[in-house]
Amino acid sequence: MKAKKLLIVGTLLLSTIVLASCGKSSSKGYSTTGSTGGTYQGVIKGGHYKTSKARGVNINQNNNQYNLKSFESGLTDVSKRVFSTKNYIFQEGQYLSTDTIESWLGRKTKSNPNGLNPTRGKKSDPNPEYIQQIEEQDYMTESGSSLKLKGMTIGIGINSEYNYHKKTDGPSYTKKISDEEVQRQGKIAADKVLKRLRQRKDLKNIPIVIALYKQAPDDSLVGGTFFAYSKNSGSSVSTWHKLNYKNTVLPKANAETSQNSGSSTDNDSFSNFKSQIQNFFPNLSGVTAQAQYHNGSLSGMHITITTQFYSQSEISSFTAYITRAAKRYLPHGIPIDIKIQSDSEMQAVVYRNSGSDNFQSHVFNSY
Protein backbone atom coordinates (compact mmCIF):
# COMPACT_ATOMS: atom_id res chain seq x y z
CA MET A 1 0.00 0.00 0.00
CA LYS A 2 2.01 2.88 -1.22
CA ALA A 3 0.88 6.32 -2.30
CA LYS A 4 3.40 6.17 -5.11
CA LYS A 5 0.89 3.99 -6.97
CA LEU A 6 -0.74 7.16 -8.24
CA LEU A 7 2.52 8.30 -9.81
CA ILE A 8 3.19 4.84 -11.21
CA VAL A 9 -0.17 4.79 -13.01
CA GLY A 10 0.67 8.09 -14.66
CA THR A 11 4.09 6.83 -15.65
CA LEU A 12 2.62 3.71 -17.27
CA LEU A 13 0.09 5.77 -19.24
CA LEU A 14 2.79 8.14 -20.41
CA SER A 15 4.99 5.24 -21.49
CA THR A 16 2.55 4.26 -24.22
CA ILE A 17 3.01 7.68 -25.79
CA VAL A 18 6.73 8.26 -25.33
CA LEU A 19 7.97 4.71 -25.09
CA ALA A 20 11.47 5.38 -26.31
CA SER A 21 12.14 7.91 -23.58
CA CYS A 22 11.11 5.82 -20.55
CA GLY A 23 12.39 2.32 -21.26
CA LYS A 24 15.27 0.36 -22.62
CA SER A 25 14.93 -0.60 -26.26
CA SER A 26 16.15 -3.85 -27.79
CA SER A 27 17.08 -5.03 -31.25
CA LYS A 28 14.99 -8.15 -30.49
CA GLY A 29 11.77 -6.15 -30.30
CA TYR A 30 11.24 -5.77 -26.56
CA SER A 31 11.61 -2.79 -24.26
CA THR A 32 10.80 -1.97 -20.66
CA THR A 33 8.48 0.53 -19.06
CA GLY A 34 11.16 2.00 -16.82
CA SER A 35 10.50 2.30 -13.11
CA THR A 36 10.26 4.69 -10.20
CA GLY A 37 11.90 3.94 -6.85
CA GLY A 38 11.05 0.52 -5.47
CA THR A 39 8.99 -0.69 -8.44
CA TYR A 40 9.67 -3.22 -11.16
CA GLN A 41 10.21 -2.45 -14.81
CA GLY A 42 7.58 -4.14 -16.97
CA VAL A 43 8.01 -5.83 -20.35
CA ILE A 44 6.82 -4.26 -23.61
CA LYS A 45 6.99 -6.37 -26.74
CA GLY A 46 6.01 -5.37 -30.25
CA GLY A 47 5.02 -1.96 -28.96
CA HIS A 48 2.49 -3.37 -26.48
CA TYR A 49 2.58 -4.17 -22.79
CA LYS A 50 2.84 -7.95 -22.38
CA THR A 51 -0.31 -8.99 -20.52
CA SER A 52 -0.91 -12.23 -18.63
CA LYS A 53 -2.06 -15.33 -20.50
CA ALA A 54 -4.57 -15.99 -17.71
CA ARG A 55 -5.56 -12.45 -16.84
CA GLY A 56 -8.38 -12.09 -14.31
CA VAL A 57 -9.17 -15.80 -13.90
CA ASN A 58 -10.76 -16.78 -10.58
CA ILE A 59 -13.75 -18.91 -9.63
CA ASN A 60 -16.98 -17.00 -10.04
CA GLN A 61 -17.85 -16.73 -6.37
CA ASN A 62 -15.33 -13.92 -5.72
CA ASN A 63 -17.66 -10.97 -5.13
CA ASN A 64 -15.27 -8.82 -3.10
CA GLN A 65 -13.29 -6.59 -5.47
CA TYR A 66 -10.93 -5.64 -2.64
CA ASN A 67 -9.70 -9.25 -2.65
CA LEU A 68 -8.70 -8.97 -6.30
CA LYS A 69 -6.77 -5.73 -5.79
CA SER A 70 -4.99 -6.67 -2.56
CA PHE A 71 -4.13 -10.12 -3.96
CA GLU A 72 -2.26 -8.63 -6.91
CA SER A 73 -0.50 -5.84 -5.02
CA GLY A 74 0.33 -8.08 -2.07
CA LEU A 75 1.78 -10.75 -4.36
CA THR A 76 4.17 -8.19 -5.83
CA ASP A 77 5.24 -7.17 -2.32
CA VAL A 78 6.03 -10.82 -1.53
CA SER A 79 8.05 -11.10 -4.74
CA LYS A 80 10.18 -8.13 -3.71
CA ARG A 81 11.38 -10.16 -0.72
CA VAL A 82 13.07 -12.58 -3.15
CA PHE A 83 13.48 -10.83 -6.51
CA SER A 84 15.08 -7.39 -6.17
CA THR A 85 13.54 -4.57 -8.20
CA LYS A 86 17.09 -3.51 -9.11
CA ASN A 87 18.07 -6.87 -10.59
CA TYR A 88 14.86 -8.29 -12.05
CA ILE A 89 12.32 -7.19 -14.66
CA PHE A 90 8.67 -8.04 -14.08
CA GLN A 91 6.68 -9.88 -16.73
CA GLU A 92 3.01 -10.85 -16.49
CA GLY A 93 2.54 -14.63 -16.32
CA GLN A 94 3.24 -16.34 -19.64
CA TYR A 95 3.41 -20.03 -18.66
CA LEU A 96 -0.02 -20.79 -17.19
CA SER A 97 -2.84 -20.38 -19.70
CA THR A 98 -6.46 -19.48 -18.98
CA ASP A 99 -7.50 -23.10 -19.62
CA THR A 100 -4.89 -24.38 -17.17
CA ILE A 101 -5.87 -21.99 -14.37
CA GLU A 102 -9.57 -22.65 -14.89
CA SER A 103 -8.92 -26.40 -14.72
CA TRP A 104 -6.91 -26.07 -11.50
CA LEU A 105 -9.54 -23.85 -9.88
CA GLY A 106 -12.28 -26.35 -10.69
CA ARG A 107 -13.43 -29.29 -8.61
CA LYS A 108 -11.63 -32.60 -9.03
CA THR A 109 -13.80 -34.87 -11.20
CA LYS A 110 -13.35 -37.63 -13.75
CA SER A 111 -13.44 -35.02 -16.50
CA ASN A 112 -11.17 -32.64 -14.56
CA PRO A 113 -8.57 -34.71 -12.66
CA ASN A 114 -6.38 -31.61 -12.13
CA GLY A 115 -8.97 -29.73 -10.07
CA LEU A 116 -7.53 -28.45 -6.79
CA ASN A 117 -10.95 -28.22 -5.15
CA PRO A 118 -12.70 -31.37 -3.82
CA THR A 119 -15.72 -32.98 -5.42
CA ARG A 120 -18.99 -31.33 -4.46
CA GLY A 121 -20.38 -34.21 -2.40
CA LYS A 122 -23.92 -33.82 -1.08
CA LYS A 123 -25.88 -30.99 -2.64
CA SER A 124 -27.46 -30.24 0.75
CA ASP A 125 -24.05 -30.14 2.47
CA PRO A 126 -21.38 -29.61 -0.22
CA ASN A 127 -17.64 -29.65 0.29
CA PRO A 128 -16.27 -26.09 0.14
CA GLU A 129 -14.39 -24.70 -2.81
CA TYR A 130 -11.21 -23.78 -0.98
CA ILE A 131 -8.96 -22.46 -3.76
CA GLN A 132 -10.32 -19.18 -5.13
CA GLN A 133 -7.65 -17.70 -7.36
CA ILE A 134 -4.17 -18.33 -8.73
CA GLU A 135 -1.80 -15.80 -10.25
CA GLU A 136 1.59 -16.16 -11.92
CA GLN A 137 4.32 -13.52 -12.01
CA ASP A 138 7.53 -13.99 -14.02
CA TYR A 139 10.86 -12.38 -13.17
CA MET A 140 13.37 -11.83 -15.95
CA THR A 141 16.94 -10.66 -16.40
CA GLU A 142 18.57 -9.23 -19.51
CA SER A 143 20.87 -11.68 -21.26
CA GLY A 144 22.61 -10.00 -24.17
CA SER A 145 19.84 -8.66 -26.37
CA SER A 146 17.08 -10.82 -24.91
CA LEU A 147 15.23 -11.48 -21.67
CA LYS A 148 15.64 -14.74 -19.78
CA LEU A 149 13.29 -16.20 -17.16
CA LYS A 150 15.12 -16.32 -13.82
CA GLY A 151 12.31 -16.72 -11.31
CA MET A 152 8.58 -17.10 -10.81
CA THR A 153 6.05 -16.26 -8.11
CA ILE A 154 2.72 -18.07 -7.77
CA GLY A 155 -0.04 -16.66 -5.57
CA ILE A 156 -2.77 -18.97 -4.27
CA GLY A 157 -5.92 -17.42 -2.79
CA ILE A 158 -7.87 -19.54 -0.27
CA ASN A 159 -11.45 -18.85 0.78
CA SER A 160 -12.25 -18.03 4.41
CA GLU A 161 -15.92 -18.82 3.79
CA TYR A 162 -17.89 -20.77 1.20
CA ASN A 163 -21.30 -19.64 -0.10
CA TYR A 164 -23.64 -22.17 -1.67
CA HIS A 165 -27.27 -22.99 -2.53
CA LYS A 166 -28.99 -26.22 -1.57
CA LYS A 167 -31.57 -25.63 -4.28
CA THR A 168 -31.39 -23.67 -7.52
CA ASP A 169 -32.78 -20.18 -6.86
CA GLY A 170 -33.01 -21.10 -3.17
CA PRO A 171 -31.55 -19.17 -0.22
CA SER A 172 -27.79 -18.76 0.14
CA TYR A 173 -25.90 -20.57 2.91
CA THR A 174 -22.40 -19.87 4.21
CA LYS A 175 -19.78 -22.21 5.64
CA LYS A 176 -17.01 -20.59 7.66
CA ILE A 177 -13.54 -22.03 7.03
CA SER A 178 -11.19 -21.95 10.00
CA ASP A 179 -7.72 -20.41 9.83
CA GLU A 180 -6.23 -23.86 10.40
CA GLU A 181 -8.14 -25.28 7.43
CA VAL A 182 -7.24 -22.29 5.25
CA GLN A 183 -3.56 -22.94 5.95
CA ARG A 184 -3.87 -26.70 5.46
CA GLN A 185 -5.70 -26.44 2.15
CA GLY A 186 -3.33 -23.75 0.89
CA LYS A 187 -0.27 -25.86 1.62
CA ILE A 188 -1.83 -28.94 -0.03
CA ALA A 189 -2.54 -26.90 -3.16
CA ALA A 190 0.94 -25.34 -3.11
CA ASP A 191 2.62 -28.76 -3.14
CA LYS A 192 0.52 -29.91 -6.11
CA VAL A 193 1.09 -26.70 -8.06
CA LEU A 194 4.86 -26.79 -7.55
CA LYS A 195 5.10 -30.41 -8.73
CA ARG A 196 3.09 -29.54 -11.85
CA LEU A 197 5.26 -26.54 -12.65
CA ARG A 198 8.45 -28.61 -12.35
CA GLN A 199 7.15 -31.00 -15.00
CA ARG A 200 7.75 -28.26 -17.56
CA LYS A 201 11.25 -28.26 -19.01
CA ASP A 202 11.60 -24.46 -18.94
CA LEU A 203 10.59 -24.31 -15.24
CA LYS A 204 12.76 -27.11 -13.84
CA ASN A 205 15.70 -25.06 -12.57
CA ILE A 206 14.40 -21.60 -11.65
CA PRO A 207 13.50 -20.50 -8.09
CA ILE A 208 9.73 -20.60 -7.64
CA VAL A 209 8.10 -18.63 -4.84
CA ILE A 210 4.65 -19.72 -3.70
CA ALA A 211 2.61 -17.33 -1.56
CA LEU A 212 -0.63 -18.14 0.29
CA TYR A 213 -3.44 -15.59 0.66
CA LYS A 214 -6.51 -15.73 2.88
CA GLN A 215 -9.54 -14.22 1.11
CA ALA A 216 -11.68 -11.72 3.01
CA PRO A 217 -15.46 -12.44 3.19
CA ASP A 218 -17.69 -11.00 0.48
CA ASP A 219 -19.10 -8.29 2.76
CA SER A 220 -15.69 -7.09 3.96
CA LEU A 221 -14.68 -3.49 3.22
CA VAL A 222 -11.02 -4.54 2.98
CA GLY A 223 -9.25 -7.30 1.09
CA GLY A 224 -7.56 -10.36 2.50
CA THR A 225 -3.87 -10.82 3.34
CA PHE A 226 -0.93 -13.07 2.51
CA PHE A 227 0.00 -15.24 5.49
CA ALA A 228 2.93 -17.40 4.27
CA TYR A 229 5.41 -17.84 1.42
CA SER A 230 8.10 -20.31 0.42
CA LYS A 231 11.07 -20.03 -1.95
CA ASN A 232 11.67 -23.36 -3.66
CA SER A 233 14.51 -24.81 -5.72
CA GLY A 234 13.14 -28.36 -6.00
CA SER A 235 9.85 -30.14 -6.62
CA SER A 236 8.73 -30.16 -2.98
CA VAL A 237 7.80 -27.09 -0.97
CA SER A 238 10.58 -26.09 1.42
CA THR A 239 10.31 -23.97 4.57
CA TRP A 240 7.26 -21.75 4.96
CA HIS A 241 7.91 -18.18 6.11
CA LYS A 242 5.07 -16.59 8.08
CA LEU A 243 3.68 -13.19 7.13
CA ASN A 244 1.82 -11.17 9.75
CA TYR A 245 -0.50 -8.71 8.00
CA LYS A 246 -3.92 -7.48 9.07
CA ASN A 247 -6.31 -5.18 7.21
CA THR A 248 -9.04 -3.24 8.96
CA VAL A 249 -11.51 -0.41 8.41
CA LEU A 250 -11.43 2.87 10.35
CA PRO A 251 -13.16 4.25 12.32
CA LYS A 252 -13.82 1.20 14.49
CA ALA A 253 -16.44 0.58 17.12
CA ASN A 254 -15.11 1.00 20.68
CA ALA A 255 -15.24 -2.75 21.36
CA GLU A 256 -12.91 -3.44 18.43
CA THR A 257 -10.12 -1.18 19.70
CA SER A 258 -10.15 -2.07 23.40
CA GLN A 259 -7.87 -5.10 22.92
CA ASN A 260 -5.07 -3.29 21.11
CA SER A 261 -3.70 0.00 22.40
CA GLY A 262 -1.84 0.71 19.16
CA SER A 263 -4.94 0.15 17.09
CA SER A 264 -6.88 2.32 19.52
CA THR A 265 -4.41 5.20 19.11
CA ASP A 266 -4.58 4.94 15.31
CA ASN A 267 -8.36 4.86 15.45
CA ASP A 268 -8.41 7.95 17.68
CA SER A 269 -6.10 9.81 15.29
CA PHE A 270 -8.33 9.02 12.33
CA SER A 271 -11.51 9.85 14.26
CA ASN A 272 -10.05 13.26 15.18
CA PHE A 273 -9.15 13.87 11.54
CA LYS A 274 -12.64 12.86 10.43
CA SER A 275 -14.38 15.06 13.03
CA GLN A 276 -12.22 18.04 12.17
CA ILE A 277 -12.99 18.03 8.47
CA GLN A 278 -16.69 17.24 8.98
CA ASN A 279 -17.03 20.21 11.37
CA PHE A 280 -15.62 22.63 8.81
CA PHE A 281 -17.16 21.04 5.70
CA PRO A 282 -20.62 19.59 6.38
CA ASN A 283 -21.30 18.43 2.80
CA LEU A 284 -19.54 15.08 3.20
CA SER A 285 -21.29 11.77 2.53
CA GLY A 286 -18.64 9.61 4.14
CA VAL A 287 -15.08 9.46 5.49
CA THR A 288 -13.57 5.98 5.87
CA ALA A 289 -10.12 4.42 5.83
CA GLN A 290 -8.53 1.09 5.04
CA ALA A 291 -5.58 0.50 7.35
CA GLN A 292 -2.95 -2.22 7.10
CA TYR A 293 -0.88 -3.54 10.02
CA HIS A 294 2.39 -5.46 9.63
CA ASN A 295 3.66 -7.28 12.72
CA GLY A 296 1.20 -5.28 14.80
CA SER A 297 2.33 -1.83 13.59
CA LEU A 298 0.42 0.44 11.23
CA SER A 299 2.13 0.29 7.83
CA GLY A 300 -0.18 2.27 5.55
CA MET A 301 -3.58 3.82 5.08
CA HIS A 302 -6.02 4.44 2.21
CA ILE A 303 -8.68 7.09 2.98
CA THR A 304 -11.80 7.75 0.91
CA ILE A 305 -13.79 10.97 1.32
CA THR A 306 -17.08 11.20 -0.56
CA THR A 307 -18.28 14.77 -1.04
CA GLN A 308 -21.35 16.63 -2.27
CA PHE A 309 -19.34 19.54 -3.62
CA TYR A 310 -20.16 20.87 -7.05
CA SER A 311 -18.04 23.99 -7.58
CA GLN A 312 -14.35 23.84 -8.40
CA SER A 313 -13.58 26.47 -5.78
CA GLU A 314 -15.14 24.31 -3.05
CA ILE A 315 -13.09 21.30 -4.13
CA SER A 316 -9.88 23.35 -4.23
CA SER A 317 -10.47 24.87 -0.80
CA PHE A 318 -11.40 21.51 0.69
CA THR A 319 -8.31 19.83 -0.76
CA ALA A 320 -6.05 22.51 0.71
CA TYR A 321 -7.67 22.07 4.11
CA ILE A 322 -7.37 18.28 3.94
CA THR A 323 -3.65 18.62 3.21
CA ARG A 324 -3.12 20.65 6.40
CA ALA A 325 -5.42 18.50 8.57
CA ALA A 326 -3.80 15.27 7.41
CA LYS A 327 -0.36 16.43 8.50
CA ARG A 328 -1.68 17.52 11.89
CA TYR A 329 -3.96 14.61 12.84
CA LEU A 330 -2.99 11.45 10.94
CA PRO A 331 -0.26 9.02 12.08
CA HIS A 332 3.31 9.90 11.09
CA GLY A 333 5.91 7.83 9.27
CA ILE A 334 3.65 5.76 7.00
CA PRO A 335 2.43 6.14 3.39
CA ILE A 336 -1.09 7.57 3.19
CA ASP A 337 -3.29 8.39 0.23
CA ILE A 338 -6.57 10.28 0.46
CA LYS A 339 -9.04 9.98 -2.40
CA ILE A 340 -11.59 12.81 -2.62
CA GLN A 341 -14.55 11.93 -4.82
CA SER A 342 -18.18 12.56 -5.56
CA ASP A 343 -20.63 9.78 -6.41
CA SER A 344 -19.68 10.07 -10.05
CA GLU A 345 -16.04 11.17 -10.33
CA MET A 346 -12.63 11.53 -8.74
CA GLN A 347 -12.14 15.15 -7.68
CA ALA A 348 -8.74 15.33 -5.97
CA VAL A 349 -6.03 13.32 -4.29
CA VAL A 350 -3.80 14.04 -1.28
CA TYR A 351 -0.89 11.71 -0.56
CA ARG A 352 2.29 11.20 1.42
CA ASN A 353 5.01 8.78 0.38
CA SER A 354 6.81 6.47 2.75
CA GLY A 355 9.62 8.26 4.55
CA SER A 356 8.22 11.73 3.90
CA ASP A 357 6.71 14.17 6.42
CA ASN A 358 4.84 16.30 3.92
CA PHE A 359 1.62 15.69 2.00
CA GLN A 360 1.18 16.60 -1.65
CA SER A 361 -2.11 17.18 -3.45
CA HIS A 362 -3.65 17.40 -6.88
CA VAL A 363 -7.10 18.68 -7.91
CA PHE A 364 -8.55 17.25 -11.13
CA ASN A 365 -9.76 20.09 -13.34
CA SER A 366 -11.48 20.22 -16.73
CA TYR A 367 -10.77 22.22 -19.87
Image (cartoon, rainbow, N blue to C red):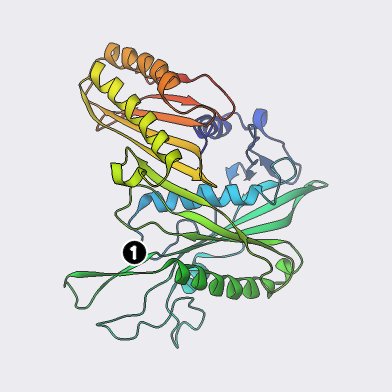
Residue 20 appears in the rendering: yes
Give percent across and percent down for residue 103: 48, 74
Which quadrant: the C terminus?
A: top left
Q: Residues within 10 Å of mark 1 (few under 14, many from 20)?
A: few
Give percent across and percent down for residue 339: 38, 30
- The amino acid pointed to by label 1 is Gln
Q: Residue at x 39, y 64 (%)?
A: 160
Q: Quadrant of residue 96?
A: bottom right
Q: Quadrant of residue 217?
A: bottom left
Q: Residue at x 51, y 50 (%)?
A: 245
Q: Is residue 88 left or right of residue 119?
A: right
Give percent across and percent down for residue 157: 48, 62
In the rendered view, tell whether residue 299 sits above or below residue 198.
Answer: above
Judging by the rendered image, the residue that carries numbered circle 1 is 61
Q: Quadrant of residue 235?
A: bottom right
In the rendered view, tell whether residue 315 sits above or below residue 216.
Answer: above
Q: Is residue 178 left or right of residue 312?
A: right
